[in-house]
């Protein structure tokens, strides 16, 4: 079973929820897809870490074979190719590595080169396998690193918890692409609610079953409560504001490992999700 | 010599954007003829700069007058050896005159080209 944890707004508690969910299971894989600033490792402090590079493919053009037909330039939906001084040129940060120009070129003048975009780190913490995607600074698209991090876990039989990036754009879509269930973490504020609705729209569009975890909850936020009721969204966990939680997080500790009550809450959360996926 | 200027939706004033300008005005200094063309990149999802610059390159333009220009479009124009001058104010006619009287300065700063789209 694969559970994706997302929130729209940053700082709502995605990593808190994802780390504690993974640490609650008897055996789990945690994948940090927030590759622009992965921070799950701050809590897991994984051991025996191995690293490997992530590449994406960029087209290169053989000017001795190119006859200037410009089919590649006209085809490129992302406008990543231009034809100047009788040769095609690629804008690497606009190119989405779709490979269309390579397939299309009647002269076979296009080949592909590997271009490094980040790394994957793999290690363990107790019963949790920790996979962390790290995007190189300055790279425009996180998708290749997220896709490599997810592929690293292909075919696993264990519970997989995917810690998504904030927002509701391509990188989030990629992160939840293989999820069986989406846990929407929401902070009971106007800002939190606004972005929550955006990710709710996204998971609905993609037909993913989902449930809600309200985090940092002191008083119920009425528009959010009403929205959940109207849309039949199950609220699986109401996590209170707590100094002990803030303290554990600031100390880089995993709450369920030091707090029995929190452990029971997350066990219950996990059971509810498992039941929802089975039904 | 052909001069290109990005033109806004009024069809009568210089556009603040190069890549996403709705139109380009092409002015031929020899014949004095001008031609307003739709910018094929105006509504591109991404890569509007390079696509608009490609349109300018293919038109045989020698000089672009624009208030600003992105890095990617700038790279295309430079690679094609097209000169880029900084327009002043929004009047198309005044800018054409100012350029021909050598009163415009070359555009030297190109803003970051890719606005974080994925």
Image (spheres, coloured by chain):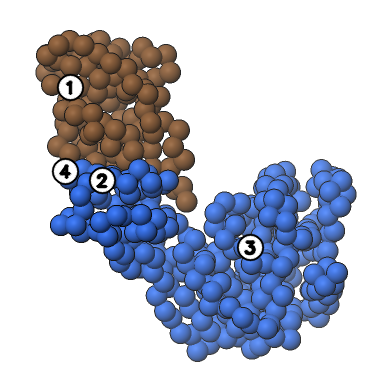
Chain colours: A blue, B brown
Q: Mark 2 to mark 1: distance in Å?
A: 25 Å
Check disc 4 and report the residue beneath it: A85
Per the rendering, the mark at residue B2 is 1
Tell me where residue A31 sits by quadrant. Answer: bottom right
Q: Residues within 10 Å of mark 3 (few under 14, many from 20)?
A: many
Chain assignment, label 1: B
Q: How far apart are the two marked residues, 4 and 3, measured between alpha carbons?
A: 43 Å
Q: Is residue A200 above or below residue B98?
A: below
Tag 4 subunit: A
Disc 3, SS: loop
Disc 4 crowd, CA 10 A, few/some/many (<14, 14-19, 20+): few
Q: Is residue A43 above or below residue A246?
A: below
Are discs 3 and 2 located on one and the same chain?
yes
Do tags 1 and 3 sit on the same chain?
no
Q: Nearer the viewer, mark 1 or mark 3?
A: 1
Q: Chain of mark 2?
A: A
């Amino acid at each position: 079973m694969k559970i994706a944890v997302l929130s729209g707004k940053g700082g709502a508690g995605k990593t808190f929820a994802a780390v504690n969910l993974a640490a609650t299971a008897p055996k789990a894989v945690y994948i940090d897809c927030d590759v622009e600033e992965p921070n799950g490792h701050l809590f897991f402090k994984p051991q025996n870490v191995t690293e490997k590079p992530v590449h994406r493919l960029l087209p290169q053009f053989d000017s001795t074979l190119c006859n200037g037909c410009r089919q590649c330039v006209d085809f490129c939906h992302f406008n990543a190719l231009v034809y100047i001084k009788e040769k095609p040129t690629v804008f690497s940060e606009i190119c989405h590595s779709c490979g269309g120009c390579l397939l299309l070129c009647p002269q076979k003048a296009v080949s592909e080169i590997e271009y490094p975009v980040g790394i994957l780190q793999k290690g363990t913490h107790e019963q949790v396998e920790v996979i962390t995607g790290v995007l190189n600074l300055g790279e425009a698209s996180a998708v290749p690193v997220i896709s490599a991090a997810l592929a690293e876990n292909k075919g696993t039989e264990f519970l997989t918890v995917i810690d998504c990036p904030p927002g509701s754009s391509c990188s989030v879509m990629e992160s939840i692409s293989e999820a069986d269930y989406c846990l929407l973490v929401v902070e009971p504020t106007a800002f939190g609610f606004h972005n929550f609705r955006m990710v709710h729209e996204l998971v609905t569009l993609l037909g993913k079953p989902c449930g809600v975890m309200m985090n940092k909850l002191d008083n119920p936020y009425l528009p959010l409560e009403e929205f959940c009721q109207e849309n039949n969204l199950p609220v699986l966990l109401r996590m209170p504001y707590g100094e002990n939680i803030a303290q554990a997080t600031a100390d880089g500790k995993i709450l369920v490992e030091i707090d029995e009550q929190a452990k029971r809450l997350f066990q219950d959360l996990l059971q509810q999700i498992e039941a929802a996926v089975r039904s | 010599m052909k001069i290109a200027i990005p033109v806004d939706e009024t069809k009568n004033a210089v556009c603040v954007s190069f890549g996403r300008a709705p139109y380009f005005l092409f002015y031929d200094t020899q014949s004095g003829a001008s031609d307003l063309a739709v910018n094929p990149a105006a509504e591109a999802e991404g890569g509007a700069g390079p696509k608009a610059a490609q349109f300018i390159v293919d038109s045989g333009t020698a000089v672009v007058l624009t208030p600003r220009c992105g890095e990617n479009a700038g790279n295309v124009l430079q690679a094609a050896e097209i000169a880029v001058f900084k327009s002043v104010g929004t009047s198309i006619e005044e800018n054409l005159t100012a350029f021909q009287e050598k009163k415009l300065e070359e555009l030297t700063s190109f803003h970051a080209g890719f606005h974080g789209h994925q």
